Every structure is written in C-alpha cells, then in structure tokens.
Amino acid sequence: MEPCPPPLRRPPPFLLLLIIILVSPTFAVDFLINSFTTAINATNLTLINDARIDTSTVRLTNDSNQFSFGRVFYPTTLRMKPTSNSSSLSSFSTSFVFSVLPEISTSPGFGLCFVLSNSTSPPGALASQYFGIFTNATTPTADPLLAIEFDTGQNPEFNDPDGNHIGIDLNTIISTQTAPAQYFNSSNGSFVPFNMRTGQNVHAWIDFDGLNFEINVTVAPVGVPKPSRPTLNYKDPVIANYVASEMFVGFSASKTQWVEAQRILAWSLSDTGVLREINTTGLPRFFIEPPSSSSLSPGAIAGIVVACVVFVIFCGSVLYLIRKKFRDESEDEIEDWELEYWPHRYSYDELKQATDGFSNENLLGSGGFGRVFKATLPNQTEVAVKCVNHDSKQGLREFMAEIESMGRLQHKNLVQMRGWCRKGNELMLVYDYMPNGSLNRWIFDKPQKLLGWRQRLLVLADVAEGLNYLHHGWDQVVVHRDIKSSNILLDSEMRGRLGDFGLAKLYEHGQVPNTTRVVGTLGYLAPELATVAVPTASSDVYSFGVVVLEVVCGRRPLEMSTEREEEEVLMDWVRELYGEGRLREAADGRLKEEYNGEEVEMMLKLGLACSHPDPSRRPTMKEVAAVLVGEEAGAAPGELLNELACGGGGGSGGERV
Ligand SMILES: *[C@@H]1O[C@H](CO)[C@@H](O)[C@H](O)[C@H]1NC(C)=O
Ligand SMILES: *[C@@H]1O[C@H](CO)[C@@H](O)[C@H](O)[C@H]1NC(C)=O
Ligand SMILES: *[C@@H]1O[C@H](CO)[C@@H](O)[C@H](O)[C@H]1NC(C)=O
Ligand SMILES: *[C@@H]1O[C@H](CO)[C@@H](O)[C@H](O)[C@H]1NC(C)=O
Ligand SMILES: *[C@@H]1O[C@H](CO)[C@@H](O)[C@H](O)[C@H]1NC(C)=O
Ligand SMILES: *[C@@H]1O[C@H](CO)[C@@H](O)[C@H](O)[C@H]1NC(C)=O
Ligand SMILES: *[C@@H]1O[C@H](CO)[C@@H](O)[C@H](O)[C@H]1NC(C)=O
Ligand SMILES: *[C@@H]1O[C@H](CO)[C@@H](O)[C@H](O)[C@H]1NC(C)=O
Ligand SMILES: *[C@@H]1O[C@H](CO)[C@@H](O)[C@H](O)[C@H]1NC(C)=O
Ligand SMILES: *[C@@H]1O[C@H](CO)[C@@H](O)[C@H](O)[C@H]1NC(C)=O
C-alpha cells in the first residue's frame, strides 16, 4: 500500500491571522506576511539587536535602552543585478503597514526606514538619529546601502525639511530627495497631507523600477486605496552604485532618550511583477482615536484585541499625564518647535544644578542682555551660561531658528556655542567658558593687570580673523551687530575670541512693529544705522574700528570729560589729533615703554579707516585681517594700509548717534 499523499493545504493555524509565505523555485522572492506571529522566528525573519515580535507586529527598538536600534530583514536576498558587473538593475515592489507612536507626542523620535543592503549589519552603523543603519559620514562612499526613510523627527543638521517626511537616502543620513507625508486624491486632484507620527497605521508602497532607475514611494493612512500618483518620485542612474547583485531587504529604526514605538504590522514584497495586497482590515491599531469617532465594528476577537490595546495605551497615557503634570510643576513645558533644535538642548534642571541654582557666587557678569553665570557640567567641563530674558515668544522662536546655524559656526576666534535651554521667556545659551573674561576688563578703569601692547595687537588680529570668518568664511554673511570690547573674550592663552554673535538679532526679532529700534551699543554704532537701520557687514567694520581705537588709546568710545562736563567722543578726538599730525599722542599713556610710534600710527589709521563715516569707503574684514595678520607675522603692512588710511583721514564728524 502506498501511503496517501499529504493534504495539499492545511487550514491556517490562526482564525484571523493570514500568513502566506511563498518562495518560488526560480528563487524569485515573493511573500506576504499579513501578521507577525511568534511562529515566525529566525527561520522566517532575521531579527537584529532590539527588534522582536511583539503583539503580532515587529517592534524595532527597546524603550529602556537609550541608544537602542533594531533591524528586521527577510532572510533571502533579492537578486538585484544579473551579474556583479552589470549596470542594469532588477525591479521589485513592496508594500507594508507601519505605525510610529511617540510616547510623548511633542517629542517624537526619528521614525523608521526601509532598507536595501548587501549586509544585515552594515559596518559602522550608528543608533540615535542614524536609523541604526548609517554611519555619521556626510559624504559617503558608494557602498551598497540604499534606504527610504519615513522620518518623524526634524534634524536640521541633516537638512530635514520637517518632522514628517519621506526621503531617499543613498548610503548617508542626508537625503538625496525628500517629500512631505501626503497622498494624492484623484477625485479632487490634490495632495492631502497627513501625520505619520500619531501612531496611526500608515500604508506604504515602494515601486523600484530597475530598468529606468526609478523609485516611487507612496504613503497614505491605512484604508485609503493605493493613490494613483506617488508621494515621491526619484529617478537617477546613480542608484546603481548603491545596489549590489544580492541585497537584503528589511527595516531599521533607532532612538535616543525619546521613547517611540516603531512597528511593522504587515509586509508584502515581490520581484516577480505582481505584488499581493495586504488585507488591512484586521490589523492591530495603536492610534488613540479622538473620542468623537467610534467605529469598532469587526469581529468579537478583533474587538477585544483593539479594546485591550486601547486600554493599555490609555493606562500608559494616564500614567504619562500624571507624570507630566507632576513634572510641569518644576519644569517648563517643552513646545513642539523647540524639539526641532533638539541636538543642543540642555534641560533647565541640568543648568540649574551646574550653576548651583544660578547662585550669586557663579555670576560672572550682567549687562544689557541679561546675566552670565559660570557653570560646571557633570563631566567637570566649565561653561558659561548666558540668561537672556525676552518678552516675546515669537521673537524667541524666530531667534531659535538661527541658534541652530550659529551652533555650527566654528572658528578658533569665536566663543563656541554649545547649546541652549528655554524656561518661560528666558533663553539660556551655553558657551565655552573663557577664564580671562572680557577685553574691556584688561584695559579700562583700573585693571588688575594691564594688557600689554603686543598682546593688544594679537587680540585685535584675532578679532579681525573671527569677524572675517563671520563675514566671508561661511556660505552666508553673518553680521555680528554688536562688536564692542565687552563682547571680546580672552581665552586661557589670552587670545581674543568674539562672543555673542547674532544675539543682537534676538532683539530685532522681538521688536514691536512700527518702532524702529536700532540694536547694538551706543558709541559703536555706524552712523548710517541712524537712517537705514539695516546692519551690514560694513557696520560691523565700523564697530571694529571703534574697538581698535579704544584698545590703542585705552579710552572708552564715549567718556564723560571731567573738565568740560560733556561727552567726549573718542573718534572725534583721534581724528582731530590726526588732522593736527599728532596721532601718536593718542596712544595709551600707560604703555609708553612698550610700543613704537609707527605701530601706533598704523593701528590708529586702520581704526579710522574702518570707522569711516561713508560705509562704501570702509575696508572689508578680509582686507583688515590681511593687514593685521600680516603685521603680526612681521610682514610689512604694505600699500593697502596707506590706501585705507587716506580714505579714513578725510572724514569729519557726524558719526555721533
Ligand atoms: C521557529 O518556530 C518553529 C515553529 O513554528 C519551531 O519549530 C522552531 O524551532 C523555531 N526556530 C527557532 C530558531 O526559534
Ligand atoms: C517559517 O519558516 C519555516 C521554515 O522555512 C516554515 O516551516 C514555517 O512554516 C514558517 N513559518 C510560518 C509561520 O510561515
Ligand atoms: C530591553 O532592554 C533591557 C535592558 O537591556 C532588557 O532587560 C529588556 O528585556 C529589553 N526589553 C525587551 C522588550 O526586549
Ligand atoms: C566582471 O568583471 C571582472 C573583472 O572586473 C571580470 O573578470 C569578469 O569576467 C566580469 N564578469 C562578467 C560576467 O562580465
Ligand atoms: C558589502 O559591500 C561592501 C562594499 O562593496 C563590501 O566591502 C562588503 O564586503 C559587502 N558585504 C557583504 C556581506 O557582502
Ligand atoms: C563620526 O564618528 C567618529 C567616531 O565616533 C568621530 O570620530 C567623528 O568625528 C564623527 N564625525 C562626524 C562628522 O561627526
Ligand atoms: C478625496 O477628495 C474628495 C473630494 O474632496 C473627498 O470626498 C474624498 O473623501 C477624498 N478621498 C480621500 C481618500 O481623501
Ligand atoms: C481634496 O480632498 C481632501 C480630502 O477630502 C481635502 O482635505 C482637500 O482640501 C481637498 N482639496 C481640494 C483642493 O479640494
Ligand atoms: C512612478 O511615478 C511616475 C509618475 O509620477 C510614473 O510615470 C511612473 O510610471 C511610476 N513608476 C513606477 C515604477 O511605478
Ligand atoms: C480581510 O480580513 C478580514 C478579517 O480580518 C476578513 O473578514 C476579510 O474577508 C479579509 N479580506 C480578504 C479580501 O481576504
């Protein structure tokens, strides 16, 4: 007796969960996983690091690990090129349902990405904002790694347009092309935006057309049929450089301290041409519905499952609300827009602790912009915390957009900004600590130790270099707007560094409309600002000229004269002496032994040239730096200076503001 042939098909083990996995004999990859059950394990999926099967989904990160990442791959590779030398690519289509649910809706993580990689563990892959798949390289080599990101957090340093977009990533976190999360509605012919970070189930389709080197990505809330036009269309033969002949397909996600659940609920893929559609009706839901809509109409079991999930989430959110309320009493509420600048944000408690509760012993100084404290971070680094009070939240917000780019300005002659924090309308900016304080303290009044002539020249050259970097060393001209001796700080080697760049702008952003308020400091303001009120690089040059004069003369730009009972303008006085050919007499008398007259003359001429009343006749910082740095190196100041000085000598008064 021959044994009976086995039954062709066994009934599915789970009533509601439909799982079909087919691997055709030609090694084509074609599968549909409509639900991830525990029966699917290492033989059916490659789960890496923190990825795991959880409530019939793949959960990618572990909430309790700060730098958690997880990846899931289909164990069989896709044959993407007929031979490894070939430049033609194969095609495939995939469709999946995912959910991204941040624990705190205003503090999303980074979302997740669909990955095509020759290795399930790409070397150098980083967690945090790198999706657990990319290195921190911003100019990558052409390794076989291509990802499509579903990004729910904005990282301005990676040029993210917002915190809710999709993007094509060719072996780097910096997307080649991005598109906002939206779907095309053909009945009214427009794109409808939606939010991918509410935890709602999102249906995504990726059509990879190897023949035309084209990738179409389409996203829509689950339930919406596949839109007729993709959300993102990318076409470039360069993708062939990022695809090897055998590629793994899967998903990856990572987190930092913000907890976010990234889940894959269902996944279908085919490289044979016909993609099997996911049945989205019975999928679990992690989205907290607004109370008005209630449409729980599936079967009893699905109802119970959904109810349980909702209940668990409800409990979680009640706990969270309680915690949040508790926390709110001590800490200021974090607003949506602030998190977009997350990389540099310090917590208020952290700064409070680092400054011993903003104690008077740690007060370094106070001035027009607020108070500055010395702080010691837990790792023993000393920093300076500048507290700026501001009455307009809108002004703060606009200013924040600039902090981000200011944080990226780096130069040996700038005081490096390390981060920021906000509490109410108070902004705290964290800078490197400058142990020797500001330049004015070494020159005016009765300094403990007078700054010598050589050192003054070095500091002025340093400031010129720093300002030259702001004006010319960056893709945009950064106007400082408040150059003065108290904004020039001396580091541990007594070299000059420019502080507070851009801060004056905060006040401009916050200004009440219709009041034209000039920002800056009296005595340093270029005369044209009284009429046009638009600070330019040239008005910075003017202020720098005033600083040169005060450093050389050892006098403040505006001083009350004891004899005449009126304000004496340093500039007018120097110009007068210049007119009378007695320029050398203007030099700081306390330094008699140290300087030679020629240097004094040269520096004063430079100062006068920079503070020429006509902006068009002032030199640029590039020219000034060339003179000063050249001088420092012992080279002759050359023709340039004479030229400049001639321009500066002719001017008369009128720069009083
Ligand atoms: C995977 O699950 C099957 C049952 O579905 C079980 O027999 C097998 O041992 C499991 N393999 C691993 C690696 O867990
Ligand atoms: C997982 O893979 C194993 C081995 O290929 C197979 O026997 C099993 O049926 C698969 N499990 C499911 C749930 O598809
Ligand atoms: C998350 O990580 C912690 C610590 O590494 C571990 O104890 C815990 O079991 C993990 N949780 C899950 C769900 O894997
Ligand atoms: C692929 O290139 C290698 C060397 O670059 C060559 O030896 C090999 O024959 C090529 N294979 C095919 C199929 O063209
Ligand atoms: C993936 O590609 C890179 C770069 O071509 C290569 O160095 C690496 O060995 C490949 N890894 C695997 C697993 O094939
Ligand atoms: C990338 O990471 C390496 C090692 O962690 C580090 O040395 C390097 O400075 C980082 N590069 C960038 C651009 O952040
Ligand atoms: C498409 O637009 C029409 C008309 O505005 C609207 O009735 C319909 O609900 C929309 N469909 C989707 C899926 O948004
Ligand atoms: C199209 O329909 C969507 C969804 O109903 C709606 O939000 C959108 O405003 C409509 N657009 C236009 C141009 O009518
Ligand atoms: C991608 O979308 C464009 C329209 O935007 C369409 O012309 C093209 O055929 C699509 N390609 C694939 C592979 O779906
Ligand atoms: C989809 O799943 C639901 C239950 O989850 C089932 O009732 C329905 O028949 C399925 N639809 C298809 C087309 O298989």
Image (tube, helix red, strand yellow):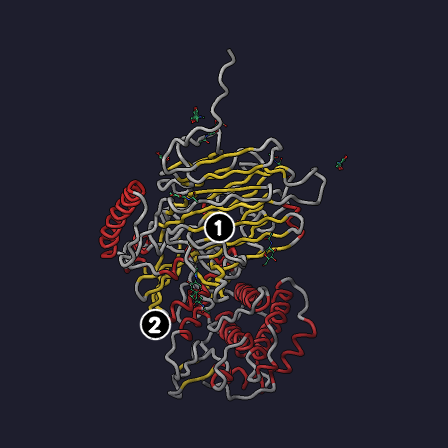
**Residue 144, how many percent across, how many down?**
61, 42
Q: Let me know if residue 343 appears in the view.
A: no
Q: Which residue is mark 2?
A: 392
Q: Which residue is mark 1?
A: 204
- How many residues crowd mark 2 within 10 Å: few (<14), some (14–19), many (20+)? some
Amino acid type of the residue that numbered disc 1 sits on in the rendered structure:
Ala
Chain-order first, disc 2 or disc 1: 1
Please give left or right for residue 104 compared with residue 620 in the image.
Answer: left
Along the line of sight, which residue is nearer the eye, 360 or 503? 503
Question: Is disc 1 placed on a helix, strand or loop?
Answer: strand
Amino acid type of the residue that numbered disc 2 sits on in the rendered structure:
Ser
Along the line of sight, which residue is nearer the eye, 87 or 268? 268
Q: Is the shortest distance between ligand 8 and the CB of mark 2 under 8 Å? A: no
**Residue 73, how many percent across, how many down?**
51, 37
Which of pointers 2 and 1 indicates the residue nearer the eye?
1
**Residue 533, how many percent across, how many down?**
48, 82
Along the line of sight, which residue is nearer the eye, 475 or 626? 475
